[in-house]
Image (cartoon, rainbow, N blue to C red):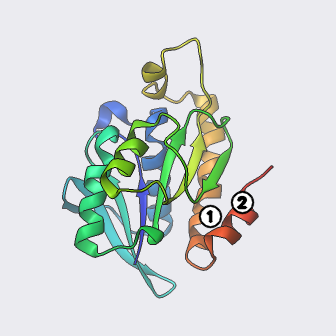
């Protein structure tokens, strides 16, 4: 079983914010597969399907982003998921807008959602797609990440989300090392 997790904050107030690009990405992926987030459990919204013969859960932790790890841990335990079969999609301040990076492991980079995942699952060795939102040093970080994506930024982000949909398609049929070699651009 594979689990594709998008990070974000629940509620309409946070819809369309930079911090919610993980939610936006998994919404676009599930739309592509014609499935909806129709189940709730352990503080998360999820849906299940089969892709290329593999059971797949798409998850949006429905607690604030800095508590995402609590929800993810409950899903890992309930579905008996290996940490190797998890892919987390999240925003990244240190990556330029319009860019993304696949990683097999790594620190949180100050991202409180990632810190909470590491705290709850006991490792930072889980696969992730970091979607760049850039960093505007003139705006306090919390205000920036919780700020709405502008129309110009949205056009760029939509292209990135299209790439992420392709990455997830390949995630089911390729090793993660091959995925990184294919999609990580120098």
Which quarter of the rendered picture does the N terminus lie within? bottom left
Residue 47 lies, with reference to residue 91, above or below; the image says below
Secondary structure found at label 2: helix
Closer-to-camera residue (54/67):
67
Residue 183 circle label: 2
Mark 1 near mark 2, Cβ–Cβ under 8 Å?
A: yes
Q: Is residue 41 left or right of residue 30?
A: left
Residue farthest to the right?
A: 186
* Residue 93 coordinates in the image, percent (x, y): 57, 33
* Residue 123 coordinates in the image, percent (x, y): 42, 56
Residue 141 lies, with reference to residue 6, above or below; the image says above
Q: CA distance from mark 1 to mark 2?
A: 7 Å
Closer-to-camera residue (155/65):
65
Residue farthest to the bottom?
A: 53
Tag count? 2
Q: Quadrant of residue 14?
A: top left
Residue 167 circle label: 1
């Amino acid at each position: 079983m594979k689990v594709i997790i998008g990070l974000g904050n629940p509620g309409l107030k946070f819809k369309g914010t930079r911090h919610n690009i993980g939610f936006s990405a998994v919404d676009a992926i599930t739309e592509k597969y014609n499935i909806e987030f129709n189940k709730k459990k352990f503080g998360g919204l999820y849906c299940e399907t089969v892709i290329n013969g593999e059971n797949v859960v798409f998850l949006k932790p429905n607690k604030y982003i800095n508590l995402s790890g609590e929800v993810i841990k409950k899903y890992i335990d309930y579905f008996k998921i290996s940490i190797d079969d998890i892919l987390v999609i999240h925003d990244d301040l240190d990556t330029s807008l319009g860019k993304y990076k696949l990683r097999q492991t790594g620190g949180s980079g100050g991202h409180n959602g990632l810190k909470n995942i590491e705290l709850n699952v006991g490792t930072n060795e889980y696969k992730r797609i970091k979607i760049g939102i850039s960093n505007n040093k003139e705006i306090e970080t919390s205000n920036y990440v919780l700020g709405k994506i502008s129309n110009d930024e949205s056009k760029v982000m939509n292209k990135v989300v299209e790439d992420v949909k392709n990455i997830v398609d390949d995630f089911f049929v390729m090793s993660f090392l091959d995925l990184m070699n294919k999609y990580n651009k120098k």
